[in-house]
Image (tube, rainbow, N blue to C red):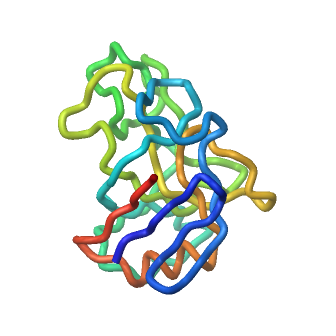
Amino acid sequence: MDLIVGQDGVARWGDRTMRCAIGRGGVRSDKREGDGGTPRGTFALRRLLYRPDREAPPRTALPAQALDPADGWCDAPPDSAYNLMIRLPYPASAESLWRADGIYDLIVPLGYNDDPVIAGRGSAIFLHLARPEFTPTEGCVALGHDDLLTVLAEADADSRVIVS
């Protein structure tokens, strides 16, 4: 099953409709680092990363990994680890995956700009938890907690996020 994400703040998972948030820059076919856009396309659900101090391991067929406070994601285009998970502190620009606001308590890295990685095309494109007001993301797709748990429980190796 695929998660179909529209620009209107609505996503579909099978016959279920759910609220979602997308990037502050809208949906972009020409995604670039820092533009706030959610890339248009079809993306694999690579794995689940979760905060073990806030979430029990969710039921999912995706490979799952518990996060720890030193986990981060490199967002520096010239760095050799661009768009990869890294350990903090890191010498290049990177964001922490261990956030106080809770939106990264459940993270699914999407198969965007990772095979191969192209410098500057955008990094850290995730499916993650929405803020309570569903305010825009920096380029990710965000769902409410219960909706994301539903997607995780029903997703398999063939599931995709389709942003149109």
Left or right, 47 with respect to 24, comes to left
Give the x, y percent position of residue 114: 26, 39
Give the x, y percent position of residue 152: 43, 76
Nearer to us in this view, 96 or 76: 76
Nearer to us in this view, 6 or 142: 6
Residue 66 sits in which quadrant? bottom left
> Is 164 placed above or below 62 here?
above
Give the x, y percent position of residue 130: 66, 59
> Is 54 placed above or below 34 here?
below
Most extreme residue toward the top, as rendered? 78
> Is 43 placed above or below 25 here?
below
Residue 92 sits in which quadrant? top left
Nearer to us in this view, 154 or 15: 15
Residue visible at 30% across and 70% down in the picture:
159
Give the x, y percent position of residue 78: 34, 13
How many numbered callouts? 0
Residue visible at 67% across and 57% down in the picture:
102
Residue 139 sits in which quadrant? top right
Looking at the rendered image, the quarter that the N terminus falls into is bottom left
Left or right, 55 with respect to 86, comes to right
Most extreme residue toward the right, as rendered? 133
Residue visible at 70% across and 49% down in the picture:
100
Most extreme residue toward the left, as rendered? 116
Residue visible at 53% across and 33% down in the picture:
95
Nearer to us in this view, 151 or 52: 151
Left or right, 110 with respect to 70, comes to left
